[in-house]
Image (cartoon, grey):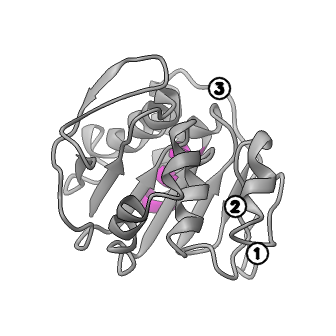
Amino acid sequence: MKMAFILYDDLTVLDFVGFYDAVTRLKAMGFLPGLEWTVCARTPQVRDGAGLRLQADAVPSSLEGFDLIFLPGGMGSRGLRKDQDFVGWLRTARPCPLKVSVCTGSLLLGAAGFLEGKTATTHPSAYDLLAEYTPKTTRERLVDEGDVITGGGVSTSIDLGLYLCERLAGAQARDQIARQMDYPYRAKPPLRPGRAV
């Protein structure tokens, strides 16, 4: 499995790191030894909302070929959703089987057309913006639509990462990774519209 973690200026770094830390442990702990990931951006370096510099592994012209793309949120997402160059780049991920976001990363999924007909969630401050892309917004913490998974606000990134660990490698993997992270919390199961529970 190949994952693309997509970064941009003015992201919220915890959105990225909470998810990244959980899912990359799938490889480190031997649950998915073939797991590969690439930190992607439109520029070689980005800054989070507080000025922390993050280095991209790649500045690919296309996101084709990945099995999963992940988009964190942050104030930068609000402007980028109107940036046709960035949104066009995201659309190259259309063939990707799994598109995942946390916080206002869902606005970028929506701008790229990936939320059509889907239920989705975002940071509580951005429900009205999310409604521009899908009338099926919800205040649920996690929403799994099969090929699109969205998470709520910033701290949801850890819950979302652990949920992906379970979805990709099973409950035992999720529980062992959560123990290794010293994370004793368990989010309620995600809303799964149109999917068997």
Disc 1 target residue: 193
- Whether residues under marks 2 and 1 lie with C-beta atoms below 8 angstroms apart, the answer is yes
Residue 112 against residue 26 in the figure, above or below: below
Visible residue check, residue 59: yes
Disc 3 target residue: 184
Q: Position of residue 54 (x, y in %)?
A: 28, 28
Visible residue check, residue 190: no
Of callouts 3 and 2, the N-terminal one = 2
Q: CA distance from mark 3 to mark 1?
A: 27 Å
Choose mark 3 or mark 2, whichever is in front. Answer: 2
Rate crowding at label 2 as few (under 14), some (14 to 19) or many (20 or more) other CA atoms within 10 Å.
Answer: many
Q: Nearer the viewer, residue 128 or 186?
A: 128
Place residue 61 in its image quadrant: bottom left
Horizontal placement of 18 versus 194: left or right?
left
Name the amino acid, label 1.
Pro
Choose mark 3 or mark 1, whichever is in front. Answer: 1
Q: CA distance from mark 2 to mark 1?
A: 8 Å
Disc 2 target residue: 143
Location of the N terminus (image quadrant): bottom left
Q: Which mark is residue 17?
A: none
Q: Position of residue 49 (x, y in %)?
A: 49, 24
Q: Position of residue 23 (x, y in %)?
A: 40, 44
Tell me which residue sits at (43%, 31%) in the image. Answer: 17
Q: Nearer the viewer, residue 155 or 27?
A: 155
Q: Nearer the viewer, residue 189 or 5?
A: 5
Residue span colored magenta: 160-169
Name the amino acid, label 3.
Pro
- Numbered disc 2: secondary structure: strand
